[in-house]
Image (cartoon, rainbow, N blue to C red):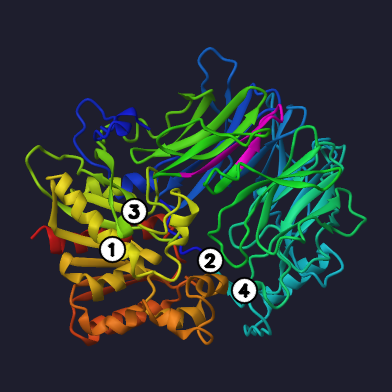
Amino acid sequence: MTLRLLVTGAALATGALVATPSAMAAPRGLTIEDLASMERIGSPVLSPDASRVVYTVRSTNLEKNRGTTQLWMIDLRAAKPAPQQLTSHETSSFDPEWSASGDAVYFLSSRSGSAQVWRLPAGGGEAARVTDLPLDVDSFHVSPKGDRLAVTMAVFRDCADLACSKKRNDERAAGKATGKLYDQLFVRHWDTWADGRRNVLYSVPLSSSPASPSSSAVSLSGALDGDITSKPFGDRGEYTFSPDGQRIVFSVRVAGKSEAWSTNFDLYDVPAAGGAAPRNLTADNPAWDTKPQFSPDGKTLAYLAMKRPGFEADRFHMILQDVATGRKRVLAESWDRSIADYRWRPDGKALLANADDIGNHRLFSLDVASGKASALTDKGYVAEFDAKRDTVVMTQNSLRDGAQLYRLAGTKATQLTQVNRDRLADVKMGEYEQFSFAGANGDTVHGYVMKPWNAEPGKKYPVAFLVHGGPQGSFGNSWSYRWNPQVYAGAGYATVFIDFHGSTGYGQAFTDSISGDWGGKPLEDLKKGLAAAGQKYPWLDTSNACALGASYGGYMMNWIEGNWSDAFKCIVNHDGVFDQRGMGYSTEELWFTEWENGGTPYANPEGYEKFNPVHHVTKWKTPMLVIQGDLDFRIPTAQALATFTALQRQGIKSKLLVFPDENHWVLKPANSIQWHHTVFGWLDEHLKK
């Protein structure tokens, strides 16, 4: 249940501050309005012959308070490859996928009134709808043979067909009674109350006539009581076709009564046309198995697997299974990194994989024969990538720039896009640098510092001390649209952010070390990290600082309030845990709190009370801004209300900002702008007097 807070340059490797590109006479820093209106690149997919890449660009209309996503393409054969817009409908077009022959691009869009699969000829012309199903299509893959689609839809499993699910949805929407009756968990998940539907995988034969979109579907996973794709963040990477198009392998957790405290996802194999029960391929592993991909020759099935049941932050290992014999082996066992995503190299001799690595998120090549891991990128965050023939494309971002599209040849990256260049032409970004220090137990701990955009030699600047969530995550060299140090730099603040014990990218033992120790080593790291930064960088005024954090970072704000409050003039707590025991009984993904605290609240109450902020309330004194999304079912609103009550009842200066329509994250553009203006107003009040 990760408590989520998601967050390139040669100079960084030498220890020098990274100077960010700017216009000749950049008169200003980055604002939240800039950040909210930036275009965002994603989903790069290469054509089968690697001659073209299709990707998405999300644009935001601040007046309409929403974003739309469109498809773009670059012809890589051109002497000067240039982006070309493919779709421009008022509704979004997303999740592109090439046909096997490369003559068309398939994508999802709601332009017909519901989410369906569409086909756009690569040579030009109008998009045609290829599915006409009674329910929204949530995700899809095109068969390598081009004869069918695999799609996922939310259905009532007791319904005999899709029309029954559609009818029940309509009847519920028209009904006047609103009560919901439950007899098992999940009752709600992330930001949505359970309504009895499951995400089910279907096979949809493609019509040979463009005028006759497919309207029938065969259930492939409906016999299993589970969601494919998984909720709330699963995607089409959880299922795949075999290269011959005859079979599909998918990942699913069978729910039963234990869904809310289980991480036992298994891989199942099923004929692509249906007609047979799914066969469990990973029944021997009670932990997480996911992201299956066949080798190009179809002889090997790769997938990611964890070893420890109930631990969502365990290392994802790469497993290779011989399709003919079923024999499995772990690839790159000694490479102590957890894989986020991967792709086969077209020759089947290596796999590309990305992973957190010492404050960056790099792309690696894993040799299939030896397991050797070789880094292909250096600084920055490689988010998405694809490989065809000898071509690799990727999206990469950093602390100085949002994602751009690159072509990678060996270890040399060539930038293909320049989104936001004109929009930010007069913006100067803050310079940043990675540093390290001796943290808890004498272990090496890493962090970053960033200067205000207009920093001058010899001057000191107030500090925004940012604490990441997760807690098994990383606040590193990446661009965020929610917690972005550059917006703080644009507002005149220096920032410091530390990858404390429990962070990812430093080996699994370092990640494991926070479990059962939320207020121990991490707090020591934060103390020592701020002191080390202040000593190394004289422009940091660490005596004039505020601490900010969300999720686990919000928990840490409450913990700091009772255990280190003298260090800060104010605190900002977004969706933070106030009472560990209450959290254990009210959050949705119980496997998380039970792992982190050594059992259930009733079986091991001491685990929940050891680092429980509620026991230190009488020591609170620092002004705090509390922020909460009322649709946050991960850290429910009662936690924020309790925090605010403790502050107000003791006469501590405090404010509460609640977003009735946001979850654990503040995503709507207008709300994000309000969030930032409120936060900066709070910082200004306490740090710029």
Instruction: First in sequence, mark 2 or 4: give its number.
Output: 2
**Circle 4 residue:** 260
Tag shown at residue 524: 1
Q: Are marks 1 and 4 in contact (CB under 8 Å)?
A: no
- Numbered range of the magenta stretch: 342-356
Q: Which residue is mark 2?
A: 1
* Residue at (56, 47) in percent of width and height: 340
Amino acid carrying mark 4 in the image = Ala
Q: Nearer the viewer, mark 3 or mark 4?
A: 3
Q: Nearer the viewer, mark 1 or mark 4?
A: 1
Decide: is 601 above or below 171. Answer: below
Is residue 350 shown in magenta?
Answer: yes
Q: For the residue labelled by badge 3, is the local secondary structure a helix, a strand or a loop? A: loop
Looking at the rendered structure, the kind of residue marked 3 is Asp
First-in-chain label (1 vs 2): 2
> Which tag, 3 or 2, sits closer to the chain's start?
2
Distance, label 1 to label 4, CA atoms, is: 32 Å
Q: Secondary structure at mark 1?
A: helix
Mark 3 highlights which residue?
A: 443
